[in-house]
Amino acid sequence: MRFHVLTLFPEMVEQAMNTSILGRAIGQGKISLKTTDIRDYAANKHNKVDDTPYGGGAGMVMQAPPVYGAYEAVTEEIGHTPRVIYLTPQGKVFHQKMAEEFAKEEDLVFLCGHYEGIDERVLDEIVTDYVSIGDYVLTGGEMPAMVMMDAIARLVPGVLHNETSAEFESFQDNLLEYPQYSRPEIWHGKRVPEVLLSGHHANIDKWRREQSILRTARWRPDLLEKARLTSKEKEFLKKHQTEIQ
């Protein structure tokens, strides 16, 4: 998986992505990151990439030529037309299934906007996906891009130490992840659930599945509507409605 980020602040992306698990994955060649500074493609001595909007209005708009120049540099380097993700509150809200879809790509380009946005003409020409990480507005697209790259990268084989971690966790089958416990066995008077100490893997799996159902019903009932529950699990949920409220 090769990530390409078109941005006005390459150092912001590089510093964050080259740490922790993702930094290790980059160092091991499991994923790669290439930032392209849009300012490098400005056609003026001050590297200015924005101008006032036609029709008036507050703020500035990023111009089409430098954005397109940065995009062309990436396509020439990789030798094909990649999928281009524009981070915008107007896009589809990012979710786990989308991360799984993007993880199948060889190259992904993230276009990070600033100011009042980017000239619509270049968006029409190069963008394949309009994506938002939530219904709120940030100062730029770099942080949303990093959120998406983190979610996508961890699905790439070899990025996580435990290869099953990316599969059995939050949002698997539209259920939130079950509660996790570690040593000590007793902390602040609270014990680890006995079933987790039993060594009986079938019972542990059953308990975890039930806890995922209850947690989803309590915190994200919208997800539960899409979850695939057995008739026994539906009955279990009905019996425990008081725990959810």
Image (cartoon, rainbow, N blue to C red):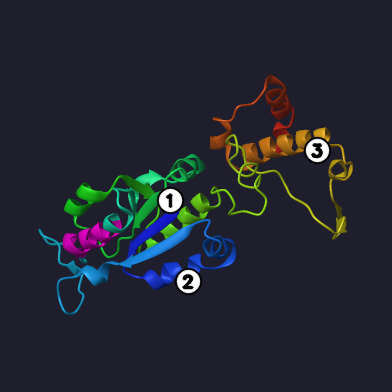
Q: Quadrant of residue 117?
A: bottom left
Foreground of the two, 202 or 68: 68
Residue shown at 37% from the left, 48% from the top: 131
Asked whether the viewer can see residue 245, the reply is no
Which label number is shown at residue 134? 1
Q: Amino acid at mark 3?
A: Ile
Q: Circle 3 sits on which residue? A: 204
Q: Is residue 187 left or right of residue 238?
A: right
Residue shown at 82% from the left, 37% from the top: 201
Q: Amino acid at mark 1?
A: Gly
Q: Is 2 included in the stretch rendered in magenta?
A: no
**Disc 2 and disc 1: Cα gap in Å?**
23 Å
**Disc 2 and disc 3: Cα gap in Å?**
40 Å
Residue shown at 86% from the left, 59% from the top: 184
If you read the primary sequence from the N terminus, does the residue marked by circle 1 or circle 3 appear first? 1
Q: Within 10 Å of the Cα at label 3, are there few (<14), some (14-19), or many (20+) other Cα atoms?
A: some
Q: Circle 2 sits on which residue? A: 15
Q: Position of residue 155 (x, y in %)?
A: 55, 47
Front label number (2 vs 3): 2
Q: Position of residue 65 (x, y in %)?
A: 17, 62
**Disc 1 and disc 3: Cα gap in Å?**
34 Å
Q: Position of residue 203 (x, y in %)?
A: 82, 34
Q: Quadrant of residue 228?
A: top right
Tell me the magenta residue range.
61-74
Residue shown at 46% from the left, 53% from the top: 148
